[in-house]
Image: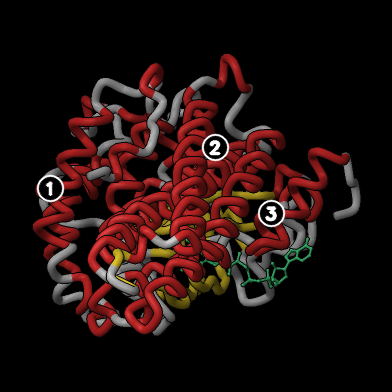
């Protein structure tokens, strides 16, 4: 019998830690998540069931520390040549169990990419924020606050819009930034966030890259208000909500890098967002494969297992083909992230555009394939006992975030066809 490990990984360039780390997470998933996940949907607000699984993974196993330097209690992934491939494996394994947990876990690192990744480590801020994540066995959450009520896609569309629509303002007053604004939807908001990375402008309406600011704000700073979590179709483990910043004051050095560089390295944050999204899709589809494999082997039609019927086998082949290619594409992009010497900086327009291409392709394939899996499973496809409907709801959400499909298409067309007004 085949397993998810028969889908190809690029063995010649994996970190030696890829398998050991993957197996640790798989064991965690089998014990802490898979037996309980059917009840996660009802737990979207309280996280009574979800919280212990986060505590085990992030706090006790210590995976919330991986990006920080070793001497600050981290695992040094930010300076490793395997940051991309190791993250891909971790996110894929978590998403196989629950992609909502995978995004909540993955986004802990998302704003921290700005300060923990070589060659642009901000040592002072690493020292300041490492204890939040590295000195506890409780789960701690970070959030990347980009999206605003007037739009999220425009804020990510940096090559054309250049931050000119950002309405969250940062004004320097002596040695402090004073932040005012309203963000919505960040993963790990809805009351759980410990540390925000906030996309701001120092000059509203400006297209000058120097006016784009990425500023860290501890969630307990006076003037920060997190609203309650939204109730959405799936991904109950990821809390999303409104955040208001009202005359929030943080030290001047909480700005990640300063004029010009904040915008430049924020594009790397988008690259990692695309990489994570592909891993979440791939992980979810691994579990769709497992559940579907069991179903088509056990369920019979005219005395034969479903998988022995031509029409079903054709669809199974297409689904397996897509899962195989999603994994290969995901690892290839992770490799591109890990080898800037070969593929250029992680914050280049090319890396962002190619990541968008892989992300929206993976989402399109998976959303279509999970629908086909449900067709094969008929009413069991909608039955929570089979888990496939959960992945159907979750996968659609991955397709919607980070500017949705349209921004992906615009950025891919722009880079490959040199479109200048999209
Ligand atoms: C589960 C989940 C997690 C999320 N996590 C985060 C997070 O961690 N941080 C965060 O800041 N936000 C987060 N978001 C918000 C998400 O990234 C935004 O919803 C998304 O970027 C789209 O922004 P918007 O909803 O404001 O739509 P808008 O930006 O208002 O876009 C509206 C429509 O226009 C389309 N569009 C955009 N640009 C173009 C273009 N150039 N040409 C044609 N059409 C275009 C869009 O695809 C969309 O269909 C999350 C959302 C979800 C559902």
Q: Which residue is painted at 23% across and 31% down in the image?
A: 19
Residue 391 appears at what percent x and percent y?
38, 67
Q: Is the residue marked 1 within 8 Å of ligand 1, measured from its CB?
A: no
**Colour pattern of the rendering:** secondary structure
- Work out whether residue 99 or residue 211 is closer to the camera in this orientation and state it: 99
Q: Which residue is painted at 40% across and 56% down in the image?
A: 285
Dot 2 and dot 1 residues touching (CB under 8 Å) = no
* Mark 3–mark 1 distance (CA, rounded to whole Å): 35 Å
If the image is split into quadrants, where does the C terminus sit? bottom right
If the image is split into quadrants, where does the N terminus sit? top left
Alpha-carbon neighbours of circle 3 within 10 Å: few (<14), some, or many (≥20)? Answer: many
Alpha-carbon neighbours of circle 1 within 10 Å: few (<14), some, or many (≥20)? Answer: few
Residue 36 appears at what percent x and percent y?
15, 71
Q: Which residue is painted at 54% across and 37% down in the image?
A: 257
Q: Earlier in the sequence, mark 3 or mark 1?
A: 1
Q: Earlier in the sequence, mark 2 or mark 1?
A: 1
Residue 191 appears at what percent x and percent y?
32, 74
Residue picked out by circle 2: 257
Name the quarter showing ligand 1.
bottom right
Dot 3 and dot 2 residues touching (CB under 8 Å) = no
Residue picked out by circle 3: 408
Q: Name the mark nearer the viewer: 2 or 1.
A: 1
SS label for mark 3:
helix
Residue 44 lies, with reference to residue 152, above or below; the image says below
Residue 78 lies, with reference to residue 362, above or below; the image says above
Q: Is residue 103 left or right of residue 182?
A: left
SS label for mark 2:
loop
Residue 27: numbered disc: 1
Q: Which residue is painted at 28% across and 80% down in the image?
A: 384
Q: Is residue 277 left or right of residue 47?
A: right
Q: Earlier in the sequence, mark 3 or mark 2?
A: 2
């Amino acid at each position: 019998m085949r397993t998810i490990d028969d889908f190809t990984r690029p063995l010649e360039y994996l970190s030696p830690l890829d398998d050991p780390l993957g197996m640790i997470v798989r064991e965690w998933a089998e014990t802490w998540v898979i037996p309980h996940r059917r009840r996660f949907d009802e737990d979207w607000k309280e996280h009574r069931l979800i919280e212990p699984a986060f505590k085990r993974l992030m706090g006790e196993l210590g995976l919330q520390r991986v990006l920080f330097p070793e001497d600050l209690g981290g695992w040094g992934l930010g300076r490793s040549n395997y940051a991309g491939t190791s993250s891909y494996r971790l996110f894929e394994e978590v998403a196989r169990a629950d992609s909502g947990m995978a995004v909540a876990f993955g986004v802990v690192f998302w704003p921290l990419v700005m300060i923990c990744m070589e060659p642009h480590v901000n040592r002072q801020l690493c020292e300041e924020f490492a204890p939040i994540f590295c000195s506890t066995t409780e789960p701690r959450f970070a959030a990347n606050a980009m999206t605003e009520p007037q739009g999220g896609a425009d804020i990510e569309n940096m090559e054309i819009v250049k931050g000119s629509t950002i309405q969250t303002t940062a004004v320097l007053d002596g040695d402090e930034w004073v932040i005012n604004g309203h963000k919505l939807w960040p993963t790990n908001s809805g009351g759980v966030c410990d540390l925000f990375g906030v996309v701001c402008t120092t000059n509203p309406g400006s297209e000058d890259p120097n006016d784009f600011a990425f500023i860290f704000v501890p969630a307990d700073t006076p003037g920060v208000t997190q609203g309650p979590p939204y109730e959405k179709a799936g991904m109950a483990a990821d809390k999303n909500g409104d955040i208001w910043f009202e005359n929030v004051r943080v030290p001047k050095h909480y700005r990640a890098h300063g004029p010009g560089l904040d915008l430049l390295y924020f594009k790397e944050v988008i690259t990692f967002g695309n990489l994570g999204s592909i891993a979440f899709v791939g992980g979810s589809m691994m579990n769709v494969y497992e559940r579907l494999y069991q179903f088509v082997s056990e369920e019979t039609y005219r005395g034969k297992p479903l998988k022995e019927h031509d029409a079903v086998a054709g669809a199974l082949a297409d689904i397996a083909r897509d899962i195989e290619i999603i994994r290969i594409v995901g690892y290839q992009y992770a490799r591109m992230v890990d080898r800037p010497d070969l593929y250029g900086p992680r914050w280049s327009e090319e890396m962002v555009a190619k990541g968008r291409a892989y992300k929206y392709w993976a989402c399109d394939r998976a959303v279509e394939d999970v629908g086909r899996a449900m067709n094969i499973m008929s009413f069991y496809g909608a039955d929570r006992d089979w888990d496939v409907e959960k992945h159907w709801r979750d996968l659609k959400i991955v397709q919607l975030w980070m500017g949705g499909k349209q921004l992906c298409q615009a950025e891919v067309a722009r880079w490959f066809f040199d479109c200048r007004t999209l």
